[in-house]
Image: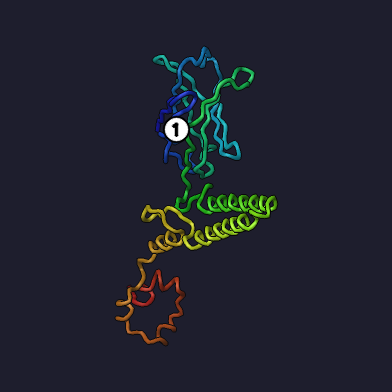
Amino acid sequence: MDIELKNLRDKILDVSPLTRILKQGEALADTVRFVLPLEREGLNLTSLVWQVIALNDKNILATDTNLHVSVADGELYIHWDITKDYTSIATNNMIIRLVGTDSGGNQIVRFDGSHPITVEPLYDFVRYEPPDAWELAIMQISIMLNTATMAAESSQSSAASAAASAALANTIVADGMAAIQQMILNGFPVRDPVTGLTVPVQTALDNLFSLHRDGALTAAEYDALELTAAEYDAYQLTAFEYDTKGKQLLGGV
């Protein structure tokens, strides 16, 4: 699939066409064509050596210098085949950067993607990269605790404000603990692959398991078997076997 990325504004590439395109483990499934002007502020862009760099907020993920450059219709086209180096890790925080260098390898100009893009995971049912809800909550709590520390320190400068500052500190810490408790109650928010909705992780896992329960007995079907407790115990079924193959093992279906 050919995807065209254009210069949105000054050295910013519109990478929105890559939204939800890249899949973990793919190799050479898509080709990107960068569209740039021939010159920028007197700089001849056709004279540069180009490379595509993928990175997140911590590391460079991949680099590719094997690009095909062409000129047509008064524009510079840089063709990039997306290799498996760029899709080996699932992420929702990958920055695409197009860099032009001179013959000595010195960076001359850089075009950055307009926003981070996603490499969809091989098994897409749990969100995988920060910032997730837990890390966001931890960040908020960290800010609260830092504020509490500053409030406590400032209380030492004035006896008159000590009580008010201490009360503020206590309130901030209490709010932080409440945020943690709320996260525990709500569970990790994930995208349910069955319904497509954002739900607590336990709900998503329950729905996935339900896909394998087509052999389960309904209450009416179980009652129709008229099994005594001793007869049921004699089957020695596990809870998993009952939930997934009850019809076959008990009802002979």
The three-letter code of the residue at mark 1 reads Val
**Residue located 52% across and 27% down the image:** 98
Asked if residue 155 can be seen in this view, the reply is yes
For this view, does 52 lie left or right of residue 151?
A: left
User: Residue 115: where, in percent of width, then height?
Assistant: 47, 35
User: Residue 37: where, in percent of width, then height?
Assistant: 45, 18
Farthest residue in the right direction? Answer: 156
Where is mark 1, residue-wise?
A: 15
User: Residue 228: where, in percent of width, then height?
Assistant: 37, 87
Q: Quadrant of residue 173?
A: bottom right
For this view, does 137 lie left or right of residue 248?
A: right
**Residue located 47% across and 53% down the image:** 126
Residue situated in front as seen by the camera: 177 or 120: 177
Placement of 97 over or under 251, stated as above or below: above
Q: Residues within 10 Å of mark 1 (few under 14, many from 20)?
A: many
User: Residue 151: where, in percent of width, then height?
Assistant: 63, 51
The quadrant of the picture occupied by the N terminus is top left
